[in-house]
Image (tube, grey):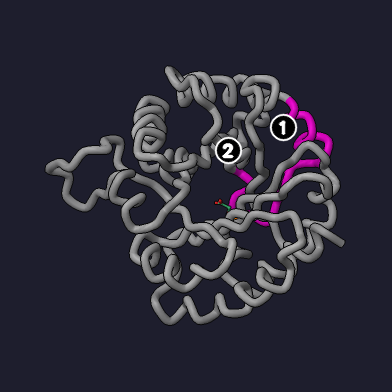
Amino acid sequence: MTNKYIYFVANWKMFGNLRTLNSLNKVISFVKKNKQRKFRLIYCPPATLIDPLKDKVKSTSIQIGAQNCHESENYGANTGQINSSMLKSVGAKYVILGHSENRQLGENDITINKKIRSSIKSGLNIIFCIGESLSQKRKKMTKKVLSRQIISGLKKIRNKDKLIIAYEPVWAIGSGLIPKEIEILEIVKFIKNKVKGAKVLYGGSVNTKNINVLKKINNVDGFLIGGASQNSNNFIDIIKKTFN
Ligand code: PGA
């Protein structure tokens, strides 16, 4: 994994307030001290923290992403929603789309496709999440499910330059469980064959212990990290171990 840039994407989910940002001082000094390391660090806090976080990391290589957006890049009568151009205007460079926690709330492949297209138009980079449920895995439907998510989610998207795919098995998220190395290797290969040139991250229960195993899977371009990214010491430890 050492010859290419490795992505570490922190998905803070519904966590954090202005005071929490102080805990990032450690990460900022770690990043400044390790400029020669080939990693890209992207923080995706709740939308309320994008602007203050952007100010906090402005002298570093850390980039900011959002966790979701509305499907239209235009203003509209959509109470409680935020669109891709609004996220861009406050400093987001990335947006996580298709996360299983949002799919579980009713987001479908068609909506995700609209969100991806509007976010590309707004100039955001996309972290597109795909993954199978436990029952789909048991029925050996993983590749079929991923194919459907990829084909529908990326419909009419020709330029894949702004696209990162995150393979996140639904059953691995927040559970402490991860697939076998060989399974991740095979699925990442499968995804890269389907979407030529795409970077592919692994996500789901990445932590300070299993990173020693995960880092050896050589076609993975990085990690989407939820729970473990909320603690700066753990997050730094994961990055350090990846390179050791
Ligand atoms: P987790 O979450 O690392 O807490 O499993 C990952 C994610 O939901 O992106």
What amino acid is at disc 1?
A: Val
Amino acid type at mark 2:
Ile
- Work out whether residue 8 or residue 133 is closer to the camera in this orientation and state it: 8
**Secondary structure type for disc 2:** strand
Residue 132 lies in the magenta stretch: no
Relative to 131, 157 lies left or right:
left
Q: As drawn, is 25 to the left or to the right of 6?
A: left
Q: Which residue is mark 1?
A: 188
Q: Nearer the viewer, mark 1 or mark 2?
A: 2
**What's the residue at 12%, 43% (across, down)?**
77
Over which residues does the magenta segment extend?
A: 171-189
Q: Residue at x 61, y 44 (%)?
A: 171
User: Where residue 235 appears, x then y in whole percent?
Assistant: 66, 67
Residue in the foreground of this view, choosing between 154 and 58 = 58
Q: Is residue 36 left or right of residue 216?
A: left
- Mark 2: is the Cβ under 8 angstroms from ligand 1? no
Circle nearer the N terminus (1, 2): 2
Q: Quadrant of the C terminus?
A: bottom right
67 or 160, nearer to the observer: 160
* Image coords of residue 141 (percent x, y): 64, 23
The answer to if 187 sits in the magenta stretch is yes
Residue at 85% x, 47% y: name it.
216
Say which mark, if any, is on residue 164.
Answer: 2
